[in-house]
Amino acid sequence: QVQLVESGGGLVQAGGSLRLSCAASGRTFSNYAMGWFRQAPGKEREFVATINWSGGIRYYADSVKGRFTISRDNAKSTVYLQMNSLKPEDTAVYFCAARVGPSTSARGNEYNYWGQGTHITVSS
Protein backbone atom coordinates (compact mmCIF):
# COMPACT_ATOMS: atom_id res chain seq x y z
CA GLN A 1 0.00 0.00 0.00
CA VAL A 2 1.14 3.51 -0.85
CA GLN A 3 -0.19 6.72 0.65
CA LEU A 4 0.07 9.91 -1.37
CA VAL A 5 -0.38 13.43 -0.02
CA GLU A 6 -0.39 16.44 -2.33
CA SER A 7 0.41 19.98 -1.27
CA GLY A 8 1.14 23.34 -2.83
CA GLY A 9 -2.22 24.24 -4.28
CA GLY A 10 -3.85 27.62 -4.03
CA LEU A 11 -4.92 30.75 -5.84
CA VAL A 12 -2.63 32.37 -8.38
CA GLN A 13 -3.01 35.00 -11.07
CA ALA A 14 -2.72 34.13 -14.73
CA GLY A 15 0.92 34.05 -15.76
CA GLY A 16 2.05 33.04 -12.31
CA SER A 17 3.71 29.88 -11.04
CA LEU A 18 3.08 27.19 -8.47
CA ARG A 19 4.89 24.03 -7.47
CA LEU A 20 2.93 21.03 -6.34
CA SER A 21 4.47 18.32 -4.19
CA CYS A 22 3.29 14.78 -3.63
CA ALA A 23 4.83 12.91 -0.72
CA ALA A 24 4.62 9.13 -0.78
CA SER A 25 4.84 6.68 2.08
CA GLY A 26 4.38 2.99 2.63
CA ARG A 27 6.49 1.29 -0.02
CA THR A 28 9.74 1.82 -1.89
CA PHE A 29 9.06 4.95 -3.90
CA SER A 30 11.43 4.07 -6.72
CA ASN A 31 9.33 1.00 -7.50
CA TYR A 32 6.64 3.27 -8.93
CA ALA A 33 6.14 5.42 -11.95
CA MET A 34 4.28 8.57 -10.99
CA GLY A 35 1.72 10.76 -12.68
CA TRP A 36 -0.19 13.98 -12.26
CA PHE A 37 -3.79 14.28 -13.37
CA ARG A 38 -6.36 17.02 -13.00
CA GLN A 39 -10.11 17.41 -12.98
CA ALA A 40 -11.83 20.70 -13.67
CA PRO A 41 -15.38 21.37 -12.48
CA GLY A 42 -17.86 19.54 -14.66
CA LYS A 43 -15.16 17.80 -16.66
CA GLU A 44 -13.57 14.39 -16.69
CA ARG A 45 -10.20 13.74 -15.17
CA GLU A 46 -7.36 14.30 -17.61
CA PHE A 47 -3.71 13.40 -17.82
CA VAL A 48 -1.14 16.10 -17.10
CA ALA A 49 2.30 14.52 -16.81
CA THR A 50 4.07 11.28 -15.99
CA ILE A 51 7.59 10.28 -14.98
CA ASN A 52 9.28 6.90 -14.84
CA TRP A 53 10.97 5.42 -11.80
CA SER A 54 14.34 7.05 -12.39
CA GLY A 55 13.10 10.39 -13.67
CA GLY A 56 14.75 9.86 -17.01
CA ILE A 57 11.53 9.58 -19.01
CA ARG A 58 8.78 12.17 -18.85
CA TYR A 59 5.68 12.82 -20.90
CA TYR A 60 3.25 15.71 -20.88
CA ALA A 61 -0.18 16.52 -22.13
CA ASP A 62 -0.05 18.87 -25.09
CA SER A 63 -1.96 21.48 -23.11
CA VAL A 64 0.84 21.84 -20.55
CA LYS A 65 3.93 21.01 -22.59
CA GLY A 66 6.55 23.74 -22.26
CA ARG A 67 4.88 25.22 -19.17
CA PHE A 68 4.82 22.36 -16.65
CA THR A 69 7.72 20.21 -15.48
CA ILE A 70 7.41 16.94 -13.58
CA SER A 71 10.31 15.74 -11.47
CA ARG A 72 10.97 13.36 -8.61
CA ASP A 73 13.35 12.93 -5.70
CA ASN A 74 13.47 9.26 -4.79
CA ALA A 75 15.51 9.97 -1.66
CA LYS A 76 12.62 12.12 -0.41
CA SER A 77 9.87 9.90 -1.86
CA THR A 78 8.38 12.96 -3.48
CA VAL A 79 7.20 13.91 -6.94
CA TYR A 80 6.83 17.52 -8.02
CA LEU A 81 4.93 19.46 -10.63
CA GLN A 82 6.37 22.87 -11.42
CA MET A 83 3.70 24.92 -13.17
CA ASN A 84 4.66 28.13 -14.95
CA SER A 85 2.73 30.55 -17.14
CA LEU A 86 -0.50 29.41 -15.57
CA LYS A 87 -3.76 30.03 -17.40
CA PRO A 88 -7.35 30.18 -16.13
CA GLU A 89 -8.00 26.90 -17.96
CA ASP A 90 -5.46 25.22 -15.64
CA THR A 91 -7.95 25.66 -12.80
CA ALA A 92 -8.70 22.18 -11.44
CA VAL A 93 -8.14 19.72 -8.66
CA TYR A 94 -4.72 18.15 -9.22
CA PHE A 95 -4.07 14.56 -8.21
CA CYS A 96 -0.87 12.62 -8.03
CA ALA A 97 -0.92 8.90 -8.67
CA ALA A 98 1.46 5.96 -8.36
CA ARG A 99 1.72 3.10 -10.83
CA VAL A 100 3.32 -0.21 -9.90
CA GLY A 101 6.31 -0.78 -12.16
CA PRO A 102 8.93 1.44 -13.75
CA SER A 103 7.11 2.63 -16.87
CA THR A 104 5.13 5.77 -17.51
CA SER A 105 1.48 5.91 -18.49
CA ALA A 106 -1.03 8.57 -19.46
CA ARG A 107 -3.97 6.34 -18.58
CA GLY A 108 -5.52 6.92 -15.19
CA ASN A 109 -6.85 3.39 -14.98
CA GLU A 110 -3.29 2.06 -15.04
CA TYR A 111 -2.46 3.74 -11.75
CA ASN A 112 -2.84 1.88 -8.49
CA TYR A 113 -2.80 4.61 -5.86
CA TRP A 114 -4.14 8.16 -5.74
CA GLY A 115 -3.79 11.17 -3.52
CA GLN A 116 -6.70 13.20 -2.25
CA GLY A 117 -6.06 16.12 -4.59
CA THR A 118 -5.12 19.75 -4.21
CA HIS A 119 -7.03 22.71 -5.64
CA ILE A 120 -5.51 25.16 -8.09
CA THR A 121 -7.41 28.29 -9.06
CA VAL A 122 -5.94 30.58 -11.70
CA SER A 123 -7.60 33.97 -11.88
CA SER A 124 -7.64 36.06 -15.03
Image: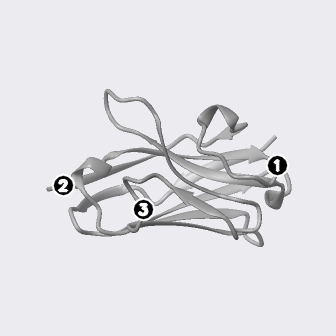
Indicate which label's residue lies in the foreground, 2 or 1: 1
The residue identified by callout 2 is: 123
The residue identified by callout 1 is: 101
Front residue (pair 40, 107): 107
Q: Quadrant of the N terminus?
A: top right
Q: Tell me where residue 4 appears, x and y as whole percent.
A: 66, 48
Q: Quick check: 118 left or right of 106?
A: left
Q: How many marks?
A: 3
The quadrant in which residue 57 appears is: bottom right
Name the residue: 35% across, 69% down.
84
SS assignment at label 2: strand
Q: CA distance from mark 2 to mark 1?
A: 37 Å
N-terminal-most mark, 3 or 2: 3
Q: Tell me where residue 88 appears, x and y as whole percent.
A: 22, 52
N-terminal-most mark, 1 or 3: 3
Q: Tell me where residue 99 appears, x and y as whole percent.
A: 73, 45
Residue that sits furthest to the left in the current view: 124
Indicate which label's residue lies in the foreground, 1 or 3: 3
The residue identified by callout 3 is: 65
Q: Amino acid at mark 3?
A: Lys
The quadrant in which residue 31 appears is: bottom right
Q: Tell me where residue 87 appears, x and y as whole percent.
A: 25, 57
Q: Amino acid at mark 1?
A: Gly
Classify 56 as above or below 86. below
Q: Quick check: 39 left or right of 30?
A: left
